[in-house]
Image (cartoon, rainbow, N blue to C red):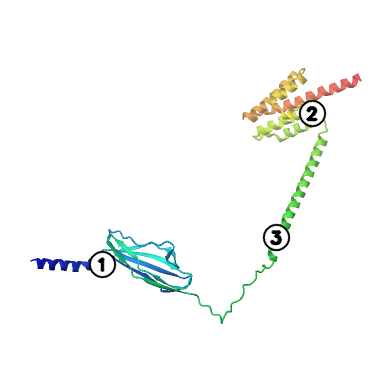
Amino acid sequence: MNIKKLITVWLFVVLAFPVLAQAFSVSAAIDSTVLYVGEQAKLTFEWTQPKDAKVQFPLFSDTIVSGLELVERLPIDTFLNEQNSLVIKQHYLVTSFDSALFFIPSQPFILGNDTQYCNPLSLKVLTIPVDTTQKAIADIKPVYAPPFNWPLFWQVIGILLCVVALIILGVWLYLRYKKQHVEHDNVLEIQDMRSAYEIALERLNEIRQEKLWQKGRPKDYHTQLTDVLREYIHRRYGISALEQTSAEVLRAIQPQLKEQKELFAILQHILQLADLVKFAKYHPLIEEDEKSLSQAYKFVEETKQVAEEAEESDSEIK
């Protein structure tokens, strides 16, 4: 009975050992055993393990062995074989810059209390042959200056000439514009030597002929009208009406018109209506627009006549 049990156990161990051995196995391979200096080869470690097991495999940093450098660690490949075991492959790109015969010893792989070693490998690295009969070794050539780039030189010169020409043209146009502007200002100054009454009357006539209030442009119309009156007041009474508000203009001219209250009221009405149109977006009637123009004529005429009478009385006294 004991002999039968012993035989049964022995048969179980003998038959199960190949299965256990197949469950954990390791190997190593390299795709080329001979390289030239600087060429690369793929080194592969492959092991088979149970699906849920954890195997400790060798890790390399910069070199596999002394002189054999690690270029890149490629991603791990895994798949299941027919026995439902997990097959893992770890690839490395290796190279060497020294001619030598490299021996890659067996590497340990540990699964629990079991340690398996892969097969050793060898790699021979050769120097690149040089045929000295075809090309003789010569000294290093000296450094030569590059040839002068004439097309680039003339291109730069052309660009510089264009820039200078544009600058000269710009200066000339500016000076011409400035000269014309000065001449225009001088012409205006000569025209402005006329009396305030003549200038104001001429511009009021232009406003009347343009008839902006009939073209749906009341703001432009009242702006031009008040500008004419402000300039007339400036020339006639020496009041800076162009830079002042309507209220300031009225306060400044009131002493000059203390004996002509009707004219002061006319001016006040014109300025206040213009402010409503310009700032309050008031839309006056056509009759109001035409009344402002007629009142502006009356203000200029009445103040001009007062000035002439004063001049005549002064001449009679003398």
Residue to which mark 1 is pinned: 22
Q: Are marks 1 and 2 in contact (CB under 8 Å)?
A: no
Residue to which mark 2 is pinned: 235
Q: Nearer the viewer, residue 300 or 247?
A: 247
Asked where in the image residue 204 lies, by quadrant, the reply is: top right
Asked where in the image residue 222 lies, by quadrant, the reply is: top right
Residue to which mark 3 is pinned: 156
Front label number (1 vs 3): 1
- Please name the amino acid that badge 3 sits on: Val
Of mark 3 and mark 2, the one earlier in the sequence is 3
Asked where in the image residue 106 lies, by quadrant, the reply is: bottom left
Of mark 1 and mark 3, the one earlier in the sequence is 1
- Please name the amino acid that badge 2 sits on: Arg
Of mark 1 and mark 2, the one earlier in the sequence is 1
- Provide the secondary structure element on which disc 3 rests: helix
* Residue 198, horizontal then vertical, whole percent: 80, 31
- Provide the secondary structure element on which disc 2 rests: helix
Q: Residue 96 vs residue 242: left or right? A: left
